[in-house]
Image (cartoon, coloured by chain):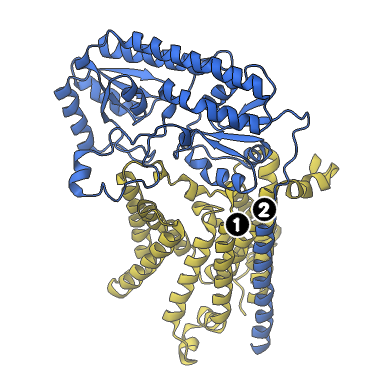
Chain colours: A blue, B yellow
Amino acid sequence: MTAEIARLRWTVVVLVGMSGMLAACGAQDAEPSRPVSGDGVPLILSTTSIWGDVTAALACEGGVRVEVLVPEGADPHAYEPSLSDRARMDGADLLVINGLDLEEGLADSVEATAEGGVEVFAAGDHVAVRGYATTESHEEAEEGHSDEHEHGHGDFDPHIWLDPLSVGQVLDDLADAMVAAGAPAEATARCADAFGETLDALHLEIVDRLQPVPATNRVLVTSHDALGYFAARYDMEVVGTVLPTPSGLAEPSAGHLGEIRALVEQRRVRAIFVDSGRAADSSAALAAELEGTSVVEISVEVMPEGAPGQRYAALMRELARAVALGLTG
Amino acid sequence: MEVITDPAGWWIAPFVEHSFMRDALVAALLAAIATAVVGTWVVLRGLSFLGDALAHGVLPGVAIAFVLDVHPTWGAMLAALAMVGTLNVLRARTPFSEDISIGVLFVGFLALAVVIMSSSSGSYSGDLNRFLFGSITGVTDADLVRQAAAAGAAVLGVVAMYRGLLVSTFDEDHARLSGFRPRAIHGGLVSLIAIAIVASFETVGNLLVFSFLVAPPATAALLVRRVPVITLVAVGIGSACSILGLLISYHFDTAAGATMALVTVVVFLIAVLARPTAGSLPRR
């Protein structure tokens, strides 16, 4: 027994030593050893296809490679990267993320990638952000929790791209970051100017499109709290969401659905907007019980097919068309 | 197959080319060491259900940590200790065998985590996914330091309790007569299981840390008979499985945590098939 214990002691000394050495060598190799892209063309990698399209618009004259990490149609909130995704992130000259906790599954990898020396551009840091449209609900305030949540993580609505003018606020800084990563300076500036004008025109087009919606109809109920920036820009109010929190785990409780139902009746809400199929069943059931309220499918993330750099605008046109139709039809 | 035609390119190059692969490797090896050392006793004492329950029992703590905006490790540790404490109370107060209490608490803790998550307002961080499956693609230096500390604590704890564990595992009466307190030793071991789980859940994931806790020591117990040797072989198997799992995940683009867990299970099954007859569990 004693001999056995002595042997075990040795084992442990070795194991603990190994643990220490492992941690030490892991901690040491922080210096970036990323492969330089073979053809010398800088690689700009975006997490979501939306920012990939905006980046493509700023690269309208070429000179950089633009790639997207999260496959189209995948939920950016829940997307978990694979090891080869991580290799792509490490190999990028600039990593463009939405930020504001949108890419939650990617957060650790983005942090570690930045630690390794890759430049990260978070679009959310370059716009006027707003809180969620519906989080500060009355029940919340009554329970006195609202103070604790102030400026904690995930307090800001990350769906900044649903307002073209917010995207416009990002362009100059994004162009600078791209140039710092090796994009041609003059060409990028020209593209940024042109795309800025495109966005301004897009904004006016959406205003026009929503013109027929009377003021009393400008109340939105959505399946998850995504339309805050859109609503704020176009004089609308998000009064409720079918999903009680932006978290993917939260299912609507019976009580919450009751509240939403009452809200819809009281405010005479014309349509429940279901984005990307979230809470589609609950929304449909809700609408079926209510006369004069329909379910309208919208897409806030998956863009229509089209040429790179033009798909974002197409998404916004489509969204405006669906909202106008839902609120007037 | 590049595995054979280009061994250096398949086995070595990913770790040379990418620092994140080295970080992932270190994290996985630390997890393998901590879980194998503690897991040996989980297997020998038949505590795998408890291990499973603890692996999931940390989740409400993680959820609370999110709501309070503190590091999830602290929440996880706290929840694991709460579960251990509650188990002790239940054991003293109910006539059931311990696995009934474990089962009830397992469900209770898991449900509590979901309830906390779904009622915490305004945050995408309410997503438990990354703790269920781990994020070995995003290991930071701070993660490694924390993991090394926990792995060291788990190993030292097992050493400190070695004699008591050995005696009480194989002959509880003898242990009592020799002046050991089997209940205290059990409690100590459960705490060590909690430490090993908390050390590993961020990288290999909560669902999968359990496979590390049980499969490599079980495989080792099939192959060798003496406890210290089982521990060493389990560390070796766990490490080899991590490396192989990482490489498979890298080359075939599969989910890293799940691949590593799958490798441990496949290795266990191979060991079962390769072993001629079913023998008894090892004695010292």
For mark 1, name the chain.
Answer: B
Which mark, residue B141?
1
SS state under label 1: helix
Query: Can residue A244 be spotted in the picture?
Result: yes
Identify which residue is drawn at 85% across, 42% down.
B5
Q: Which amino acid does label 2 sit on?
A: Ala
On screen, residue B216 versus residue A200, left or right, reads right
Identify which residue is drawn at 43% across, 47% down.
B128
Query: Can residue B270 be spotted in the picture?
Result: no
- Residue underneath mark 2: A30
Q: Do the residues labelled 1 and 2 touch (CB within 8 Å)?
A: yes
Q: What residue type is labelled 1?
A: Asp
Give the percent coordinates (x, y) of residue A188.
62, 22
Give the percent coordinates (x, y) of residue A111.
56, 46
Q: In the displayed image of the protein, which residue is found farthest to the right?
A: B5
Label 2, residues with CA under 10 Å away: few <14, some 14-19, many ≥20: some
Image height check: is B158 above or below A115?
below
Q: In the displayed image of the protein, which residue is found farthest to the left?
A: A266
**Which quadrant is the C terminus of chain A positioned in?**
top left
Question: Residue A251 lies in what quarter of the image?
Answer: top left
Give the percent coordinates (x, y) of residue A129.
39, 34
